[in-house]
Image (cartoon, coloured by chain):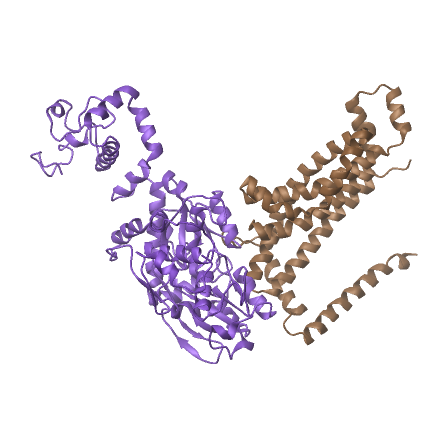
Chain colours: A purple, B brown
Amino acid sequence: MCIHCKDKNDISSCSSSLGNAFDADVSLEHCSVSDTSSGPSMGLQTHEDVIDRAIENAVVKAVFGGSDVSRRNFMKLVGSSTAMAVLSSVFPMEAAKAWAKDAPGPLEKKDLKIGFIPITCATPIIMAEPMKLYEKHGLTGTKVVKAAGWAMIRDWAVANQVDCAHMLSPMPLAMTIGAGSTATPFYMPAIENINGQAITLHVKHKAVKEPKDMKGFTFAVPFDYSMHNMLLRYYLAEGGVDPDKDVKIRVLPPPEMVANLKAENVDGYLSPDPFNQRAVYEGVGFIFKLTKELWEGHPCCAFAASKQFATEMPNTFKAALMTIVDATFYSHKPENRKAIAKAISPRNYLNQPEEVVEQVLTGVFPDGLGQTRNEPDRIDFNPFPWNSMAVWILTQMKRWGYIKGDVNYKQIAEDVFLASECGEAMKKLGYPVPPTTYEKHVIMGKVFDPEKPEEYLKTFSISRS
Amino acid sequence: MNKKKNNWVVLSLLLLVIFIGGWQLFTAVFKNLPGPAPVAKTAWFFLSDPFYDNGPNDKGIGTLALYSIGRLSVGFLAGSLVAISLGVVLGLNQTLYKAVNPYIQVLRAISPIAWMPLLLYSVQNSNLTALLVVFMASVWPTLANTAFGVSNIKKDYISVSNILQMHPVSKVFKVILPGAGPTIVAGLRISMGSAWVAIVPAEALLGSLGLGYFVWNEWNNLSLTSVIFAILIIGIVGVLIDQLFNALARRLAYVD
């Protein structure tokens, strides 16, 4: 609030710093003499207009380095609409305005198409449709559309065939920097699930105890740029097995993993559920290790949208993020898991036996070795996209040669993992927001410090970097 | 006479019985494959309500078949128009025909599915890509057959039309196309067959609604009964379409 003004409660009367920045005749100095002549409210009718103007002015001021004289000269020279257009082209003015407002503005689009892969990782994205959460946040008519594989969902998202998509958390990073595809900037404002994956082995390998027993195995993972690939490689390498030389790792769509395990084309896989539990259900595999035993609370799948979508439809993007954060916390609650399993099992969504989906979501499950395990956080849901997680993913992408050369870890992490936007949504929904976006992670007993990614990379003896 | 005429029906039904019996026996030995009874049950489930709509990812088998047939018709019509026009031009110009023919043969040998990634990358739309895959599958056999048929029309027919000083356009529609008609229809029939073969993997790989999508979605649930049911439906629809061309071929046939 402008400290020079008398009435601190009336926002429109404190208009000196809210003069039109694109008007050459207006000063933006606080309560200067010229201000009094330009009238108090300047046509700013609502709270939202005031915020719009404040954002515009902040940007304009920043551009002219605080020099009001050079701003006014510039406006005289080119005219206000040209200046506005030029500035908007380099700075996402509309997006910034939308973020600054408490109440979302009118939605640019309500009936979104959101792509998903039929796995339990996508639980919040999927359940928000049958359980009417998209409608609750104003996105009436939003439909989730099933895709057959990660390459397909990537292509759908790039070609704008879907507005937003379920992705593996390394994918938006890889797509933004152009690893494995043409570079298209993507945003990942929320993680879906944490934990929730497993290493499943064929029943003939019941004697296997540690990585060195797995030499010569053929493994399957769902995608190169996946936590599955990163975690499997990490696990094997920690046990002295080189994932590129001592074993074979193939990319297979999750549904085909069970069939391939049955046919003994693969010895095992690190895959999303329900396909680990499905292998147990079919009697062909057993759950060797849950990924939460490797990294408690690791990120897995995520909600992503192109930068283009987020900038062109800032309010819709925000509403979608609110829905996802809401749905993710709803899925986090153990008491909701059974109802969710029932809602997402039918043919239109996962197309899986409800029994299997329930075993995954409730964490009470047979492991294929004759035991019934009870692991309530076998899969859990938490939307906060820690920037430090993105840095870890980038270190592993570099470690295994998916990206080369110098990596600007923090820059990429912050450009893609929109932690502050997610925090904003969490706050609005009444959930506590972590005070920072970087933290140390412990993976298989080894501490990862996001401040020292290059030093961390040097500590691995098996590495391609 | 009548008895003899219907012998094939009896034999055909007998083969069906042998097939189902063999299938039953086979699955009694290899227990991981579903037998005829569960497949029949699945078929009943899907056929009893063929046009249900449970949202964008779950539609009745009838709706899905119509999606596939619609996609097939559009891609096939576009492909055939292009193929017949080009074929007439090539057929009337022997030098051009000889020059272009090697390329047609190369393009013809390429599986339409092989074009898919390239098409998807360039048009950036999976539905349009599926249409173009059908288009690619339909063009080459018709093109090759049309060119061949047109270049082999009896010289007398062409000479007569020249003597009568027919307008070039009416020459094409009254002499050339009817003359090459049976060959063209044979080409169309092969094209339709290869387009129908291509459409199932294209839909499965692109996630476009249709019978291919159904196969993939049921495979996702490891539901082999549904997959077998879908295979049967794909086969039956294919035969029905082929019968249409058979009828067309009979109408266009002529004796020199």
Q: Evaluate whether residue A180 shows in this view.
A: yes
> In the displayed structure, does residue A72 sit left or right of residue A193?
left
Above or below: residue B227 compared with residue A318: below
**Residue B97 falls in which quadrant of the image?**
top right
Of A427 and B3, nearer the camera is: A427
Of A418 and A428, nearer the camera is: A418
**Residue A92 falls in which quadrant of the image?**
top left
Q: Which residue is rendered at x = 56% and y = 49% of the image?
A: B208
Above or below: residue B92 compared with residue A458: above
Percent across and percent down for residue A89 are 36, 32
Residue occupying the far left of the picture? A6
Of A267 and A161, nearer the camera is: A267
> In the displayed structure, does residue A309 sit left or right of residue B61?
left
Percent across and percent down for residue A100 are 26, 42
Residue occupying the far right of the picture? B1
Q: Which residue is rendered at x = 47% and y = 77% of the image?
A: A209
> In the displayed structure, does residue A260 sit left or right of residue A240?
right
Q: Evaluate whether residue A358 shows in this view.
A: no
